[in-house]
Image (spheres, helix red, strand yellow):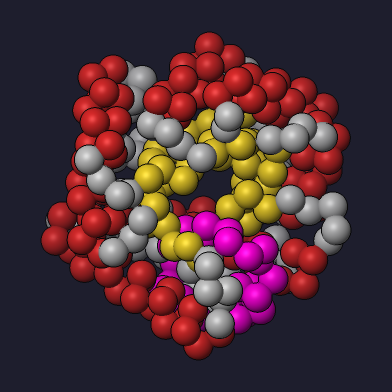
Amino acid sequence: MAPDLHLSLEHMTVLGLTAAEIIDAAELLGVGRISLILDSGPYALPAQSFLREPELVKATRSRLRQSSVSVHAAEGFLLDEQTDQVRLERLLEIAAALDAERVVAMVVDPDRGRTIENFGRLCERAQPFNLQVSLEFVAFTPVRSLADAMEIVGSVAALNGAISVDILHLMRSGGAPSDLGASDLKIGAAQLCDGPARAEPGRLTEEAMSGRLDPGDGAFPIAEFLAALPPGLVVGVETPKGGNRSHPELIASARRSLEAARRASERFG
């Protein structure tokens, strides 16, 4: 890992904590960046909704202003068959209010042409807010691979369009760290975890949501992945373990994950 690569505490790693508690956790654990799920949409995640709780925006913005922690990624930007453009616009406004660096879009729409159109529209609407739009490919969605994401981002060709690379989905979609060297690939952010060489059939979603291992505890090519990332990139540590865990348990688990990521940084730097 390059010396100037920055770690982020990802919301999914401490899913169940409030936004204020995630900021507190990042401070406690010595991490300068976090990701925040602004709204989980149709998914029943234990996360506050900045859309349904307008006062949460002001409170979180105030808390961030008092902290050295910043939001590197705002999540919850879903592109589906009936993409709600009003919802996306409101989420962009919230992300900008929180001084986020980028928003992360996920696609569950099987129509590639419509996906390209909606991603392009999101990039266009994000430009006035100075927000990057990172498209995350997910192995169990219609945009399952790095090649899929590159096709969409390349078709849109927006200056603020990029790709978010999660090592789990890179490996589970048949990719490899060597794929990250493509000259036309713009990586906006990355996510780090570990896992066995092969996933159990039919359990990709379960693994992603609750079965990730800490860096170094599995068979993923961590060294090669970190070496392939651009200098200065934010790398989110995303290791949700599942279960109804208490606040202290979430903090302890996040600490273990971050310490493992730091060891990986030292070992492979």
Nearer to us in this view, 166 or 128: 128
Instruction: Classify the position of the C terminus by image quarter.
Output: bottom right
Q: What x and y, as percent, mark residue 205?
A: 51, 53
Q: Is residue 236 magenta?
A: yes
For residue 227, which quarter of the picture?
A: bottom right
Q: Quadrant of the N terminus?
A: bottom right
Q: Residue at point 26% right, 23% down?
A: 58
Q: 53 or 263: which is nearer to us? A: 263
Q: Position of residue 8 (x, y in %)?
A: 42, 57
Q: Which residues are magenta?
A: 212-238
Q: Is residue 99 magenta?
A: no
Please determine whether, in this image, residue 87 is positioned above or below residue 138: above
| Depth order, front residue of 197/56 | 56
Seen from this angle, which residue lies furthest bottom?
267
Residue at horizontal 53 percent and vertical 11 percent from the top:
86
Question: Which residue is more in the foreground, 225 or 233?
Answer: 233
Q: Is residue 16 at least partly visible in the picture?
A: no
Q: Residue furthest top?
A: 86
Residue at 41%, 43% in the rendered image: 71
Q: Is residue 181 visible?
A: yes
Relative to 178, 38 lies left or right: left
Q: Give the answer, above or below, for where 149 lies relative to 257.
A: above
Q: Quadrant of residue 46?
A: top left
From what the image shows, is residue 122 above or below residue 20? above
